[in-house]
Amino acid sequence: MALYVESEVRGMSQQVKKLEKNIMREWPKEVQEALAKPGDVEEYADLLHLLLDASDRAGFTFTDVLAEAVKKLKENIMREWPKVEAKTEQAEPAKAAAAEDNTAVLAEAADPEGVP
């Protein structure tokens, strides 16, 4: 029985590793789709799902990732960025809407205990 269980666990471990490789191979495809359709929020949702799946497999919770993202955002806000000359008209409305939504997200992320 012990050999059977050990064999099954080893087989499952190999399947998980194969699945992880497949998920990581999916990233470039999904990034290209988002670049091809910058106005399609579904493409960004696909990237978010891949990110959360990969981070979960690495042992991080959604709260871990969100807390680190807020920390990194605060660092990036203080950073001096080079000026970008090229702007697309399609990206501007999405950028404005995202800026409005970020205020609520940051407030919730700053106090995860207060979020239901």
Image (tube, helix red, strand yellow):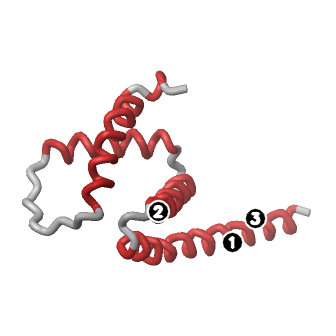
Residue 35 appears at what percent x and percent y? 35, 72
Q: Is residue 53 above or below residue 76?
A: below
Q: Is 92 left, or right, of 33 in this rendering?
A: left
Binning the other alpha carbons within 10 Å of mark 3 as few (below 14), some (14 to 19) or many (20 upward) gives few
Q: Amino acid at mark 3?
A: Val
In the rendered structure, which amino acid carries the disc numbered 2? Leu
Q: Name the residue carrying label 2.
A: 47
Helix, strand, or loop for circle 1?
A: helix
Q: Which mark is residue 90?
A: none
**Residue that lies at the very extreme toward the right in this rendered image:** 1
Mark 1 and mark 2 residues within 8 Å of each other at the beta carbon: no
Q: Residue at x 28, y 52 (%)?
A: 95
Is label 2 in a helix, a strand or a loop?
Answer: helix
Q: Nearer the viewer, mark 3 or mark 2?
A: 2
Q: CA distance from mark 3 to mark 2?
A: 30 Å
Label 3 SS: helix
- Work out whether mark 1 precedes mark 3 in sequence or the reverse, and give the earlier one: 3
Q: Is residue 5 left or right of residue 72?
A: right
In the picture of the structure, the residue carrying the numbered disc 1 is 15
Q: In the rendered view of the protein, which quadrant contains the C terminus? A: top right
Of the residues shown, which amino acid type is indicated by label 1? Gln
Q: Which mark is in front, 1 or 2?
A: 2
Residue beneath label 3, please?
9
